Image (spheres, rainbow, N blue to C red):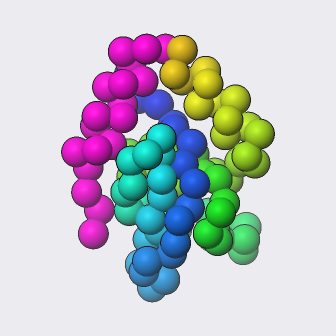
């Protein structure tokens, strides 16, 4: 199962390549945030984004991120598997 998981942007680490460091349930990974540039808003530290396969797909507010995380945590094994896959992923 593939899920879009909320993560909080910690910092933009590579402006040119549109890479940002995000925190997803304590796991910190670099993801591509270029898809969010279309509306001109981009991302800033503190923003919440939905992440899937190394790409931030959309921005969400903190309330929506918390509700989504709670729902995902209730999925049990599928959510844990997704977090394990995120831990193993690397975008540099």
Residue at horizontal 48 percent and vertical 53 percent from the top: 23
In percent of width and height, residue 7 lies at 54, 49
Q: How many numbered markers are drawn?
A: 0
Hey, which residue is sitting farthest front in the picture?
Answer: 26
Q: Is residue 34 visible?
A: yes
Quarter of the picture containing the N terminus is top left
In percent of width and height, residue 40 lies at 72, 74
Hey, which residue is sitting farthest bottom in the picture?
Answer: 16
Residue at horizontal 52 percent and vertical 54 percent from the top: 56
Q: Is residue 32 visible?
A: no
Quarter of the picture containing the C terminus is bottom left
**Quadrant hosting residue 21:** bottom left
In percent of width and height, residue 53 lies at 38, 45
Residue at horizontal 66 percent and vertical 60 percent from the top: 47
In percent of width and height, residue 62 lies at 73, 46
Q: Is residue 85 left or right of residue 48?
A: left
Majority secondary structure of the magenta segment? helix
Does 16 sit above or below residue 48?
below
Please tell me which residue lies in front, 15 or 72: 72
Image: magenta residue range: 75-92
Q: Is residue 80 magenta?
A: yes
Q: Is residue 84 left or right of residue 73?
A: left
């Amino acid at each position: 199962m593939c899920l879009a998981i909320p993560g909080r942007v910690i910092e933009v680490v590579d402006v040119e390549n549109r890479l940002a460091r995000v925190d997803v349930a304590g796991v910190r990974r670099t993801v591509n945030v270029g898809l969010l540039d279309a509306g001109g808003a981009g991302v800033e530290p503190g923003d919440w984004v939905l992440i899937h396969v190394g790409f931030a797909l959309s921005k969400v507010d903190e309330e929506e991120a918390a509700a989504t995380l709670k729902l995902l945590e209730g999925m049990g094994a599928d959510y844990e598997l997704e977090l394990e896959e995120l831990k193993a992923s690397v975008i540099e």
